[in-house]
Amino acid sequence: MSKKVRHPVMAATLWMMGALLSFMAMAVGARELSSELTTFQILFFRSLIGLPVVALFIARTGARQFGTRRFWLHGLRNGAHFTGQFGWFYGIAFIPLAEVFAIEFTVPVWTAIFAALLLGERITQSRVAAICLGTIGTLLILRPGIAAVHPAALAVLIGAVGFGFSYALTKKLAATETALTVLFYMTLIQLPLGFVPAALQWVTPSPSMWPWLLVVGLTALTAHYCLVHAFALADATVVVPMDFMRLPLIALVGFLFYSEQISWFVFAGAVVIFAGNLINIRAERRRKRDTLVPGGATADL
C-alpha cells in the first residue's frame, strides 16, 4: 500500500524535474539567441517550431480538436499571452536570469485578480494575503526609489500581468477546449503576431543559432507538458514548492555560465511571493475539502 501512496508523488517529482530542466534550457537558449536575434524573432521561431509539433499530436489523438467555436476568446487570450512571452524573453536578454524568474512568481497573484474580475471568483482572505505578499515581494525585488529599476524588469512585470490575464481566460476556455486545442491556437495565433514586427528588422539566424532555436521551441512545449502531468499526479501543495526550485537553480546557471551575481533581495522577494502563493493554495485546498462534508460551506474563507 505504501508503494501506491508514494508512487504518484515520486512520478510528479520526475515530471517536475523535466519541467525545471525545460525552463532552464529555454532561458539559456533565449539568452544565447538574444545576442543575434530580436525578441520578436525569437517569439516567431518559437511558434514556427511549436505549431507542427502540436498539430502532429492533435492529428494522432483526435482531429476534432482542431475545431473551435471560441476563436475570439483564443485571440484575446493569446494577445495577453504574447505580451507575457515578450516581457519574459525581453527580460532574459538584459537582466539576471534569477530576477526574471523571481518576478514571474507574481503570475498567480495577477491570475487571482483577473479571475475575480472576469470569472466572478471570490477574493477570499487567503487571496488577499497572497496579493499583499506578492506586492511586498515585488517591491523587494525591484526596490523602486532605492535602486535604479531596469526597463527590462518592468517589461517582465508587465509580462507577468499578461500571463495572469491569459491564465484567467484559459480557465474560461477549459470548459470547452482541450489542452492541445489551447496549445494549437496559441502557436497558430502567435505565429503572425511575432512575424510581422520581426520582419521589419529581420536578421537571418546564423547556423550556430539554429540549435538554440530548436531548444527554445521544443522546451516551451515540454515545460508545460511536464507541469500538466505533475499537477495531475500530485496536489498543488506538493508541486508548487518543487516549482520554486526554479529560482536557486537558474541563479546557479546564471552564476556559472554568465557570471551573474546573486542578489539576496531577489531571493527575499521571491520567498515572500512564494509564501503568499502557498498560503492561498493551502487555504483553497482546505476550503474544497471542507465543502465535501456536511456543514463545510461555513468554512469558506
Image (cartoon, rainbow, N blue to C red):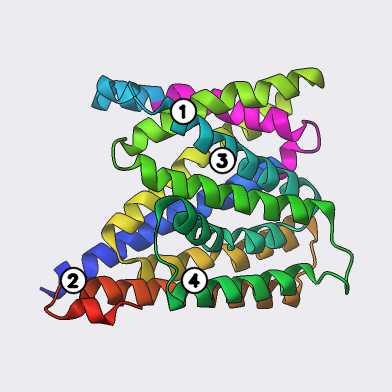
Q: Which element is circle 1 on?
A: helix
Give the image location of residue 70, x and y in percent. Answer: 38, 28
Location of residue 56 (image quadrant): top left
Query: Mark 3 belongs to which amino acid?
Result: His
**Do the residues under discs 3 and 1 have CB atoms within 8 angstroms?**
no
The magenta segment: 31-54
Q: CA distance from mark 1 to mark 2?
A: 43 Å
Q: Residues within 10 Å of mark 4 (few under 14, many from 20)?
A: many
Q: Quadrant of the N terminus?
A: bottom left
Query: Mark 1 belongs to which amino acid?
Result: Trp
Q: Taking 28 as reference, is 201 left or right? A: right
Task: Tell me if I can see residue 205 in this picture.
Answer: no
Q: CA distance from mark 1 to mark 4?
A: 31 Å
Query: Mark 4 belongs to which amino acid?
Result: Asn
The residue shown at (40%, 71%) is 281
Among numbered discs 3 and 2, the one appearing first in the sequence: 2
Residue, disc 1: 72
Residue, disc 4: 277
Give the image location of residue 258, x and y in percent. Answer: 78, 55
Q: Is residue 39 magenta?
A: yes
Q: CA distance from mark 3 to mark 1?
A: 14 Å
Among numbered discs 1 and 4, the one appearing first in the sequence: 1
Q: Residues within 10 Å of mark 3 (few under 14, many from 20)?
A: many
Q: CA distance from mark 3 to mark 2?
A: 37 Å
Tell me the mark number nearer the camera, choosing from 2 and 4.
4
Tell me the mark number nearer the camera, choosing from 3 and 1.
1
241 vs 212, nearest the viewer: 241
Residue, disc 3: 81
Residue, disc 2: 5
Location of residue 238 (image quadrant): bottom left
